[in-house]
Structure formats: C-alpha cells, structure tokens
Amino acid sequence: MTDKLNPEDNYDVILVIMQRQQITNILPILKDNQKVPSIIFVGNNMEGAAEYSKILNEDRILLGFGGVGGYRENQLVITAYLDQMSFYVGELDGKISDRLKKIEDILTNSGIEVKLSDNIDAWLKTHVSFISPLAMGSYAAKKHNTTLGRDIELLNLSIVGIRENIKALKELDIPILPKKFKTLSWIPKYILRRKLLNLLNSAYGKIALSGHARAAKNEMNRITKDFRDFIKDVKTDLSSNNKLYELSFA
C-alpha cells in the first residue's frame, strides 16, 4: 500500500481503494504516471468509467469490487469479511482478456480469491441497488436511536426499496448480477427479512454493513443520488425509495 504515486513509479497494476467521491482528486496523479498499464477502481460505482475516461486512457481502466467493509476508529481500521468473499474485477468491454487473467494470477498468488466478470458495470449497479436502501434504512433508524436490525418497519421498507431498484434495472435492460441477486425479486418477504435480520445483527453485519454505512455516509449519499438519477425515467414505482431518501438524507 502506498499513499503517493510518482510519475516514474512502475507497477503491474494499481488498485484504487477509496470512497467514490474521493477519487476525483487523484485522477490527475494517475494521469501523470504513464508507466502502469492497468488501474482497477475498486468500490461502489454507479457511473462506470465515465468520469475516469475523461482524464485517463480508457484502455488502462478496469473496475472491481472487494467484499470487505469496515470503518476507522481511534486510528485503527476495523474490518470484517467472510471466508467465501471474492474480489470481482472486469474489463470495461466485458472481455475476459489476457490482461485480466494475469491480474487474476497476481491477486490469487497474494491469497485473494478472484472472480472475473464479463459485465462488471452491471454487477456494480446491482450492488448499489441492494446496498442503497439498506444504508438509507440504517440512517433513518439512527435518527430513531435504534438500528435497522431492530426496526422491522424500516427494514420492511428497505426490502421493498431493494425490489423497486431491481425492477428498475430490469426495465432498463441491466442484467442482475451476480445471478443469485435475482432471487431478491421473488423470495418471500418474511424469508428475506429473516436473512437480513440475521446478517444485520451479526458481528459481521455490525462492522461491514451498519458500521461501514455510518463511516461512509458521504459515499452512500453520492451513490444513492447517482442511482436515483440513473433510474429517474423508469415507470417502476419508486415510492419506498423516495420515502427512505426523505427519512435519511433529506
């Protein structure tokens, strides 16, 4: 890990792991370095490479996501992850390129489980569709001096918000990825509620979900606004998401 990049520094690949709204400031630094051929922007992202490609050559850009969450506390980084968590990475054009396979080898040799995506943009949009209502529900619950895992009314509203978002993506012909997320549309609500309650109230959930949401409110606000802008013209009813937004960010 490094906190600076010089124009002459040469690496196989750069992983940019920052909150979404922080990345703008480092794009000129990445541009000044022409030695590194591959830059993976890791994290929540609704806009794909649109902003990055205005400054960087598009052929240097990859998108990814790591299944780790947490927050800083007293100069410590508190993180949580599950054993089966994987690092997702993909090319902008969806090809499983030789470069992607080389990056897979590099990360795998570092002990990281890698999954190559043939549509990383859709994967990231699906993730935002899921995490945004939960984050908004968490902020709304905090205003009531409780947590989302203890407020069934807000959790039910968040579940409906997730389903609205999935339906909106389908209306826009965005694939739902990973495919298991398709179950969010039809799984009985009481089963999904029970699963989310178990997750939110677990040690992992308190760090990687609610803890991360508390520490990254600016990022969640940004990606929620980006998502709302992306789906603003759909015919899908978005009333639950609108209510969550009013309760959390308005």
Image (cartoon, rainbow, N blue to C red):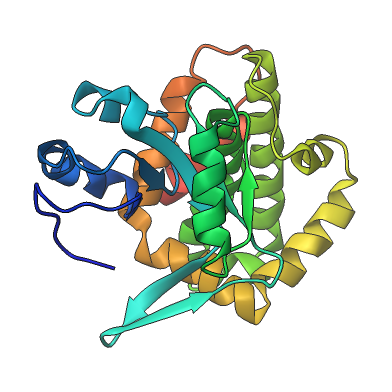
Residue 96 position, x and y percent, is 60, 31
**121 relative to 45, above or below:** above
**47 relative to 35, above or below:** above
Q: Nearer the viewer, residue 56 or 216?
A: 56
Name the residue located 62 percent from the left edge and 42 percent from the top edge. 116
Number of disc labels: 0
Q: Quadrant of the N terminus?
A: bottom left
| Left/right of residue 192 with respect to residue 87 in the rendered view | right
Residue 145 position, x and y percent, is 48, 73
Q: Quadrant of residue 50?
A: top left
Can I make out residue 160 in this image? yes
Q: Quadrant of the C terminus?
A: top left
| Left/right of residue 71 with respect to residue 4 in the rendered view | right
Q: Nearer the viewer, residue 142 or 100?
A: 100
Name the residue located 26 percent from the left edge and 85 percent from the top edge. 75
| Left/right of residue 187 with respect to residue 200 in the rendered view | right
Q: Nearer the viewer, residue 27 or 9?
A: 9
Residue 159 position, x and y percent, is 70, 46
Can I make out residue 243 in this image? no
